[in-house]
Amino acid sequence: MAINLVKGQTIDLRKNDGGTDYDLSEVTIGLGWDVRKKETGFFASLFGNEEDEYDLDAIAFLLDANGKAVNTGRKKPQSNGRSISYYGGDIIFFNSMQHPSGHIWLTGDNRTGAGEGDDEQIIVKLNDLGHQYQKIVFVVAIYMGQAHKQHFGMVENAFIRAVDKRGREIARFSLSGNSTYNGMRSMIFAEVYRHDGSWKFRAIGEPHTTDNFVDLLKQYT
């Protein structure tokens, strides 16, 4: 049975409380969210009551033993209307979806949160990652959240979860229903890190007002 984590809680990804081994040869970090429905009624019908589209992005920073991202990538021409134009480094995001090692990648860029389950996924082959990588930090940011006057307080059913190769959910961390996330547009969600020959998962839930994940990256470079 998956563990429902609270902020700051750490678990060993290899085993659950029942002692069951998880298959960490491939772990999926799933991010999901829904947009809060607008109020209905007479005035809402006059001005429209469709849900706004929210573009939440899942991002991963691969860090060394000093907690630093050594290779932040190389510049390339902008694509997909995005403002960030780096690729080929230790940062996994919408413009650099696969790590050069081939052992961690982003499956796609969901720009609406539509659909059930995970809206974006980062897949990691933990056991294949080189030992120069000691930690992976997972971040979520609302793309152009400030320009669109959007923040996490307007998002429902937001979660991050870890699933093993067999599809068994290891842990889930919910971010909805917390008023401290009002006005916040990015967040350090969680991290996995090496410890005594194993991998541990820690729920962080540290919110920030910026909608630019590069602002968060600065503390790791």
Image (spheres, helix red, strand yellow):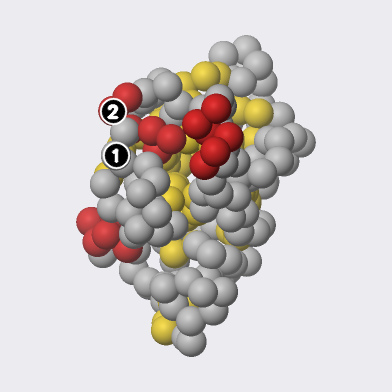
Is residue 1 found left or right of 43 in the rendered image?
Answer: right
Q: Tag 1's secondary structure?
A: loop
**Image height of 220 relative to 4, above or below:** below
Circles 1 and 2: CB atoms closer than 8 Å: no
Query: Which quadrant of the figure contains the N terminus?
Result: top right
> Which residue, as the protein is rendered here, is positioned at the far right?
166
Residue 68 screen position, x and y as percent? 30, 60
Residue 218 screen position, x and y as percent? 24, 61
Total marks shown come to 2
Q: Residue at x 65, y 59 (%)?
A: 108
Please give the residue where the numbered disc 2 appears in the rendered image.
180
Please give the residue where the numbered disc 1 appears in the rendered image.
183
Front-most of residues 80 and 221: 80
Q: Amino acid at mark 2?
A: Thr
- Please tell me in which quadrant of the rendered image residue 164 appears: top right
> Which residue, as the protein is rendered here, is positioned at the far bottom?
77
Is residue 70 found left or right of 143 in the rendered image?
Answer: left
Residue 67 screen position, x and y as percent? 29, 54
Q: Residue at x 53, y 70 (%)?
A: 96
- Please tell me in which quadrant of the rendered image residue 129 appears: bottom right
Query: Which quadrant of the figure contains the C terminus?
Result: bottom left
Q: Residue at x 41, y 73 (%)?
A: 83
Q: Amino acid at mark 1?
A: Gly
Residue 70 visible in the displayed image: yes
Residue 61 visible in the displayed image: no
Label 2 environment density (alpha carbons within 10 Å; few <14, some 14–19, many ≥20): few
Label 1 environment density (alpha carbons within 10 Å; few <14, some 14–19, many ≥20): some
Q: CA distance from mark 1 to mark 2?
A: 8 Å
Q: Residue at x 23, y 56 (%)?
A: 219
Q: Tag 2's secondary structure?
A: helix
> Which residue, as the protein is rendered here, is positioned at the far left?
219
